[in-house]
Amino acid sequence: MSQHDDTTTEHHSQPAEAVCSFYRIRFRDDGQEHTASAPLADLKRGDTVMIKTDHGLEPARIYGPAPADPEGAVERKVSCEISRRPTSDEENRYLSLASHEQNAFAVCERLIDKHDLVMRLINVEKFFNGSKMIFYFTADNRVDFRALVKDLVQEFRTRVEMRQVGVRHETKMIGGVGICGRELCCSSFMKKFDSVSIKMAKEQDLPLNPAKISGVCNRLLCCLTYEYDIYRKQRKGMPKVGRKIKIGTEIYRIKRQNPLQQSLIAGTSDGEERLLSKEQWTAGELLPSDKSPKRNGRRSSPAPETDGTGENGGDNTNAPTS
């Protein structure tokens, strides 16, 4: 009896393990992918589902299953939750939603020209329930679009919001391909923009050529932040460039660091370069820096060896004679 119970338990537990409750979805075919949870286990790529949002249900398309933690040790984070499958009417309305947004885009561009506004329309988003439309645009300065909003409200008979965005968000909405040959990070998976500085490029020994470290938006590449902390961590404890290190009887001057390999490129007294592994440079002796201390904003020179009368190691070569 106990064997029969064990078999039954195993038989019922297998389907539960096979259920995939996480999916990759997109609200628009050219939009960003999100991870959603669902009680439905038989969803396939191309299926339409209804997503819970703060303004009601929105349709989205399934783009495939999303991986979950197999051991359940970490709670899987999701962006949204799948409520149910759509009805046939909802499916048809979703198919026509993109054409409605394209039509609203054309109407808005025509009205922008009519009011002679200095702004560039980027994208139009229409809520599935028709309660609101958001028009995204860029502009160098503040734009008085009150007359434009009145015309749009009269045209579409719904709430209208004009939302100004920067060049990074513009690129995120339009999409594209980066210099690496892959889809732009901002349009494919990034949820927010982190601060990027030229210091991050220097830390990773990247060329400071703007054409090589700038993205499609003409701003510093977002991917400069990905490995920045790793490089900082790896450089800690490594001798700095310009320092001298003694290994055995040979003295080397450090020319370059390889943080990821934890190695150093150093030059010998004969002008030759040598690769020093971590085991080699950690076993060596780091010599004191040959930089003299500064005094009164100028670097002081060592006292002459002949008389040693220089005060605090100052240079008395040009001192007046008595």
Image (cartoon, grey):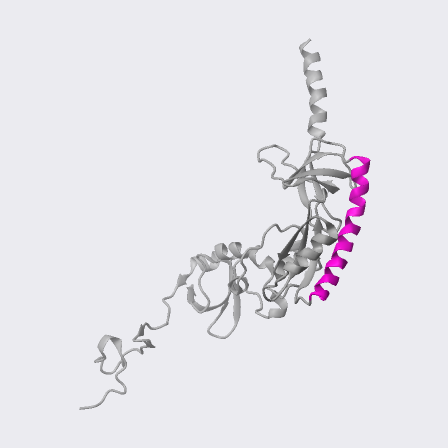
Image position of 205 with respect to 316: above or below = above
- Which sits in the foreground, 42 or 11? 42
Residue 91 in the magenta stretch? The answer is yes
Q: Which residues are magenta?
A: 87-115
Question: Can you name the residue that lies furthest to the left here?
Answer: 322
Q: What is the x, y in percent for residue 208?
A: 57, 69
Q: Residue at x 39, y 62 (%)?
A: 285
Residue at the far top in the pictured view: 1
Q: Quadrant of residue 286?
A: bottom left
Position above or below: 132 against 272: above
Q: Nearer the viewer, residue 16 or 101?
A: 101
Location of the C terminus by quadrant is bottom left
> Residue at 55% across / 55% down in the picture?
194
The x and y percentages for residue 149 are: 67, 56
From this viewpoint, is residue 206 visible? Answer: yes
Q: Position of residue 76 (x, y in %)?
A: 61, 37
Between 35 and 67, which is closer to the camera in this rendering? 35
Name the residue: 71% across, 12% down: 4
Image quarter (top left, top right, bottom left or bottom right) of the N terminus: top right
Q: Is residue 171 visible?
A: no
Q: Is residue 166 left or right of residue 98?
A: left
- What is the magenta segment's predominant secondary structure? helix
Res. 119 image quadrant: bottom right
